[in-house]
Image: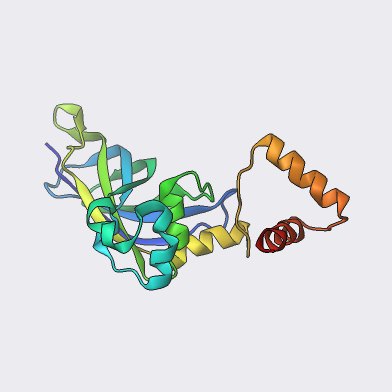
């Protein structure tokens, strides 16, 4: 039977993707010398917040997720970032492939709130692997599962996520609004002859502070 070792060895922002995307570089090693025809790889990617420290500004940005610092011993739970798939071409020994991971400004998703709150350092990731391995030998093609216990940790630089977002939304963030709320905001902007959405929201915020 084939025996795979999997590791994440790097990451970068995909500059040519149609939407914000990070590429995690996976190194796949077959340790028994068995030729691998292909691997249909499935990866569950989790954020493990307990594995890093947070400054005061980051802690303030995480209140919505985890509450005040005094509660973090109970609330700092793993967050689901993404499920990703990739076909690994045939190899003998070891190979590297890029695993595309889509990024988003959907603030209804906990993982994206978490990423937005971080300013520097790294994001502690855990990659959990499953899938199917196609190998060759004297008896022909063999099909084997990737064992459930295969996993890898990786410290994703926060700068990589920010670069992936800035390539498509430079200096911007997005908020999803209900249709009625958007219509009301649009009418407010038109009524007051405001040229941008930023102006409309800034004016409303100033009025709310009076």
Quadrant in the picture for residue 4: top left
Quadrant including the C terminus: bottom right
Q: Residue furthest front?
A: 210
Please give the name of the residue rendered at 39% of the width and 52% of the height, measured from the top-left corner. Answer: 65
Q: Position of residue 62 (x, y in %)?
A: 40, 59
Q: How is the image coloured?
A: rainbow
Q: Is the residue 182 above or below the residue 172 in the image?
A: above
Foreground pick, 11 / 153: 153
Please give the name of the residue rendered at 47% of the width and 59% of the height, measured from the top-left corner. Answer: 116
Tell me: 169 left or right of 81. Answer: right
Quadrant in the picture for residue 159: bottom left
The answer to whether one can see residue 153 in this image is: yes
Q: Is the residue 62 above or below the residue 82 in the image?
A: below
Tell me: 2 left or right of 113. Answer: left
Q: Position of residue 174 (x, y in %)?
A: 61, 52
Foreground pick, 5 / 89: 5
The answer to whether one can see residue 6 in this image is: no
Quadrant including the N terminus: top left
Q: Position of residue 36 (x, y in %)?
A: 24, 41
Foreground pick, 64 / 161: 64
Q: Position of residue 184 (x, y in %)?
A: 75, 42
Please give the name of the residue rendered at 11% of the width and 46% of the height, measured from the top-left corner. Answer: 32
Please give the name of the residue rendered at 38% of the width and 55% of the height, measured from the top-left corner. Answer: 24
Q: How many marks?
A: 0
């Amino acid at each position: 039977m084939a025996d795979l070792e999997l590791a994440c060895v790097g990451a970068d922002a995909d500059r040519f993707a149609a939407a914000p995307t990070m590429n995690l570089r996976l190194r796949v090693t077959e340790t028994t010398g068995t030729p691998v025809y292909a691997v249909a790889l499935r990866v569950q990617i989790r954020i493990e917040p307990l594995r890093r420290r947070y400054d005061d500004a980051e802690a303030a940005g995480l209140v919505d997720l985890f509450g005040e610092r005094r509660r973090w011993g109970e609330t700092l739970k793993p967050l689901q970032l993404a499920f990703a798939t990739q076909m690994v071409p045939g190899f003998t020994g070891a190979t590297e492939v890029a695993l595309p991971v889509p990024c988003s400004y959907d603030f209804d998703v906990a993982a994206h709130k978490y990423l937005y709150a971080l300013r520097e350092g790294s994001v502690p990731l855990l990659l959990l692997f499953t899938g199917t391995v196609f190998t060759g030998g004297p008896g022909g093609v063999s099909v084997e599962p990737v064992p459930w216990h295969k996993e890898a940790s990786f410290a994703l630089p926060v700068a990589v996520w920010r670069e992936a977002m800035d390539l498509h939304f430079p200096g911007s963030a997005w908020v999803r609004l209900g249709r009625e709320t958007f219509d009301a905001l649009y009418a407010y902007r038109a009524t007051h002859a405001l040229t941008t959405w930023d102006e409309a929201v800034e004016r409303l915020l100033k009025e709310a502070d009076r």
